[in-house]
Image (cartoon, helix red, strand yellow):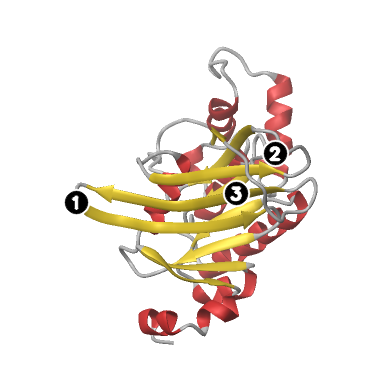
Amino acid sequence: MSEEHEHNHEHSACETHCHCIRINNLGVKLGKDVILDDVSLHMHCGELTVVIGPNGAGKSTLLKAILGDVPHEGTIDLKETATGNQGNMKIGYVPQSLNIEREIPITVYDLFASFISNTPTWLFKSKKLYNKIYEQLKIFSVEDCIDKQVGKLSGGQLQRVMLSIAITPMPNLLILDEPVSGIDENGVRDFYRVVNELKTKYDLAILLVSHDLHLVKKYADKVILLDKTILAQGTPDEVYMNDSFREIFGE
């Protein structure tokens, strides 16, 4: 679940050994309809940036543009301050939901291996690859699911498996399109705690689309209020005090 994009680098205020992702004047049009207009934002490693906004605000389109799945205007740049050289940008992605037939006999190992190995898993099971996948699943405490059928997993287990895949290999940017469908309230809270631990332990830049304003306020380092363009950005407190936030969410 990682994609590689080459980007030019530019100067910024990140610390040494850090990477920064800078989105400049990003725009998306569908025919004559403007979906996103002049979106500019800056993400640092070790920070959770959360995008909030009303339905139809263009939140998922923003993620798709960063992933290169929809044509866009503007630029997306990665800078590694340690070298200043150009490099490849690795993006890990977890979608909102996965359409997996419950009865398909594919195991977590098979699913994981299909993303990170070129060898067909039905030919043979590589012990080395099996152990690598086991260790990656262990990060999210789902190593006991490695031989289970994907369709038999709970929503929370599947989410953790997809997170494991998304950080193999470790990306520069992890994009999460609020992958909490089919998960109860406790599972959603666990998800935010896991994301917070991931950000801290691996110094990851994480971009998350969310509708849970309470948990966003608790865990986000930076909030982007989006409605086709950026209406406000800053700390949760700064954005939640903004007039545009109050108009949209009535809080």
Give the residue pinned by disc 2.
Answer: 136
How many dots with numbers? 3
Distance between mark 2 and mark 3 Cα atoms? 25 Å
Q: Residue furthest front?
A: 11
226 versus 30 height, above or below: below
Q: In the rendering, at what x and y percent does residue 141 appear? A: 70, 49
Q: Residue at x 56, y 12 (%)?
A: 123
Circle number at residue 92: none
* Mark-to-mark CA distance, 3 and 1: 29 Å
Horizontal relation, residue 8 to residue 101: left or right? right
Q: Judge left or right: residue 210 versus residue 79.
A: left
**Do the residues under discs 3 and 1 have CB atoms within 8 angstroms?**
no
Circle 1 residues within 10 Å: few <14, some 14–19, many ≥20: few
Residue type for callout 2: Gln
Secondary structure of the residue carrying tag 1 is loop
Q: Amino acid at mark 1?
A: Lys
Q: For mark 3, what is the residue?
A: 21
Of 138 and 67, the residue lying toward us:
67
Q: What is the crowding at mark 2: few (fewer than 14 residues within 10 Å), some, or many (at least 20)?
A: many
Q: Is residue 228 left or right of residue 14?
A: left
| Nearest to N terminus: mark 1 or mark 2 | 1
Return the disc, 3 or 1, that comes first in the chain's sequence.
Answer: 3
Say which element carries label 2: helix
The image shows residue 70 at horizontal and vertical percentages of: 36, 41
User: Label 1, label 2: how many angstroms apart (C-alpha)?
Assistant: 44 Å
Which residue extends farthest left?
32
Disc marking residue 32: 1
Tell me if residue 96 can be seen.
Answer: no
* Residue drawn at x 74%, y 37% as measured from the top left: 135
